[in-house]
Amino acid sequence: MISVSDALDTLLDLVSPMAAETVPLRAAAGRVLAEPVSAKRDQPPFAASAMDGYALKSAEVEKDAMFKVIGESAAGHGFTGRVGAGQAVRIFTGAPIPEGADFVVIQEDISRSGNLITIANHPGTSTNIRPKGGDFQIGTTIDAPRVLGSADIALLAAMNIAQVPVRKQPTVALISTGDELVLPGDTPGPDQIIASNTFGLDALLTAAGARVRILPIARDTESDLRTAFELAQDADLIVTIGGASVGDHDLVAGVTETLGMSRAFYKVAMRPGKPLMAGTLGQSAMVGLPGNPVSAMVCGHIFILPMLRAMLGLATDTPALLTAPLAHPVSENGPRQHYMRGRFDGQSVHVFDDQDSARLTLLAEANVLVVRPPKDGARATGERVNYLPI
Amino acid sequence: MISVSDALDTLLDLVSPMAAETVPLRAAAGRVLAEPVSAKRDQPPFAASAMDGYALKSAEVEKDAMFKVIGESAAGHGFTGRVGAGQAVRIFTGAPIPEGADFVVIQEDISRSGNLITIANHPGTSTNIRPKGGDFQIGTTIDAPRVLGSADIALLAAMNIAQVPVRKQPTVALISTGDELVLPGDTPGPDQIIASNTFGLDALLTAAGARVRILPIARDTESDLRTAFELAQDADLIVTIGGASVGDHDLVAGVTETLGMSRAFYKVAMRPGKPLMAGTLGQSAMVGLPGNPVSAMVCGHIFILPMLRAMLGLATDTPALLTAPLAHPVSENGPRQHYMRGRFDGQSVHVFDDQDSARLTLLAEANVLVVRPPKDGARATGERVNYLPI
């Protein structure tokens, strides 16, 4: 048996970052920036007022000073003249500071009568001016890689970057195998169950940025499996589910071998989800997951999501483990790394009593996988444990 | 000025849950379940083997006992006969337990010679059988409302629920106003900037489940704004950005008034983002956000996301605030609730020194908004503060 981290290293070696493509700004939300981009302008593009008020000369600012209002500077319509001694320009938030002015007295400190204003209260020392380029300047970069969130999209817009270089989305072909499987909506025979892994993994991988193709369920025959692999051959990643022990032989292994796949089997020291197969088939990376629903989904979190991150050019060296105190004691762990379903309630983490890998209901109730290293000792209430949010 | 929570209550009063619609399972990922759904079958649908091994009678299990193998039960192909005394059936994980058998000896504890097997090691007490309905039974429900994650989708599949009742996605029309704005990719004039709020809010609201329509930028004229509102009139929610103080008058307020909107203004005791307008226009709820980029995005998090949650039928009474210790001291807060940009590094939270509401770069760097209540006192390193992940 090999460790989870050795297995993951092997899987990550099978994939490489996707090429970049350019998409319109709006379509870049949630995508991964592929290369650094640079602002095409300064923000603000001019010295701008931070407040509604009057722009004038700072040297003339004192209580009871009077000024003549000679014009207005609004957002989109700056004042084109120059502010001289004893003069002021009505100005609004975001509007350009007119030439000759270097101070904005906020309107609350002004009394106005016709075109004359008086500084009624002593203004503070702030000029209320945002300097040109104060937020960013031409050439300021956003570094890659980076998952583009809503604030990044706003920032890219402000930088006038209308076309964004992002990593292509990896295509993933999902092949569920097994005579026992039928699709949701079908009527299963007495010995059959509904294919659930396919749909769960589809949702998981799609949310992580993959373009998922669900292939028809492959029956437990060589020809059915061969057809499925042919349909999958242009995918960046092929994921098979089940089929690793059909009767006494491994059907998926046999077929992939005849297709020329160099592959390896791994018994991974983990619970749930021990058996794993991996290799390369033509241009595609290929991973064979166990058919047990909870094992398949947990392996999706632990192995396939990091592979997608690698394909998207994101860092894979640090799993996003968090820590929280236990709400109750847990007993010692066995020799395999155990991913235990549980719930984090914002304060502490509850580990479910029942960890039967056939119980999908408990996976749906869980919002974390508590990660117990091999041979981790018993832990008391309040001890901090690592967990992966799911 | 009114408090943030009073403002939010007022906004939530403007919206109600969307109607339900039925979508195929695959399209239900990430959607909100609108009503409870019930399993259409038991899982497992039959008593099933939890291991690869041999099914036989528990009364006959003892070390060195011998059995004749009379058949095989594989996933999808159960054994149709009956297991009698001294008989065993080869069985694989997930396969139906044949009639007459009530125990599975795992294959590691068996030695086999032709059709004869011997129990070579003492089996444990576990029957290695998963009882029929052990995970869920016909009628087991998934409660609504619930955001459907990948494990839920797998569970719905296993329950054979191929069509899922979910809340319709609210349509949101975004109207940016201002003569100073141009779209990304355009060439701005000397007094102009790029519309960034529209694109940032689009990404934010889309990720939260809205169907966002970006309307053309409305110039600061009544006719342009009127056209924008006409284009928006079938949206569930209309969000305007900016236009609240154009020169000395409020253009959006004027136009919505002539369109018959009953509306109210709120000066909300918050930083950033003080001014807010809200009301109902025809069938649409309408919210007017400040034009400042950071204010607009923060108001999106604080006000618009909860409105979307309400429209999706989700709970809105408990904001998803987390707590973390401060990485450094912070000074006392003023009279308004302050949403301070900062970063949580997994251990503690850093609050940025510069909280200038014009600095979009700092919003993009932030992954949290630290929430400081009005008049919150100075806080020392290590004191826990509330934050909202963004």
Image (tube, coloured by chain):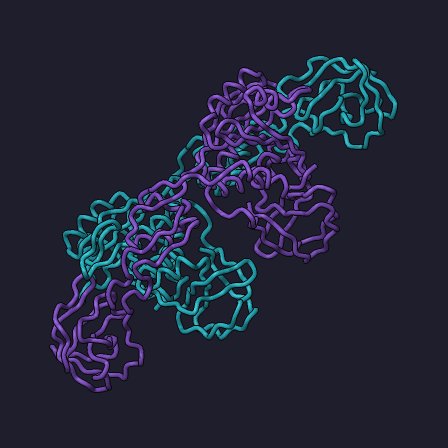
Chain colours: A purple, B cyan
Q: Residue at x 26, y 83 (%)?
A: A121
Residue in front for this viewpoint, A50 or B375: A50
Q: Quadrant of the C terminus of chain A?
A: top right
What is the quadrant of residue B27 in the picture? top left
Residue B132 placed where, x, y %?
66, 27
Q: Residue at x 36, y 56 (%)?
A: A141
**Residue B256 visible, this orientation:** yes
Residue in front for this viewpoint, B8 or A353: A353
Q: Is residue A245 above or below residue A108?
A: above
* Total numbered badges shown on the rendered structure: 0
Q: Is residue A217 above or below residue A376?
A: above
Q: Quadrant of the N terminus of chain A?
A: top right
Residue A223 placed where, x, y %?
54, 15
**Residue B159 visible, this orientation:** no
- Judged left or right of residue B134, residue A307 is left
Q: Is residue A120 above or below residue B206?
A: below
Residue B125 placed where, x, y %?
81, 32
What is the quadrant of residue B245 in the picture? bottom left
Residue B363 placed where, x, y %?
39, 59
Q: Is residue B327 above or below residue A295?
A: below
- Judged left or right of residue A142, residue A346 is right
- Judged left or right of residue B355, residue B226 is left
Q: Residue at x 74, y 24 (%)?
A: B53
Residue in front for this viewpoint, A268 or B318: A268
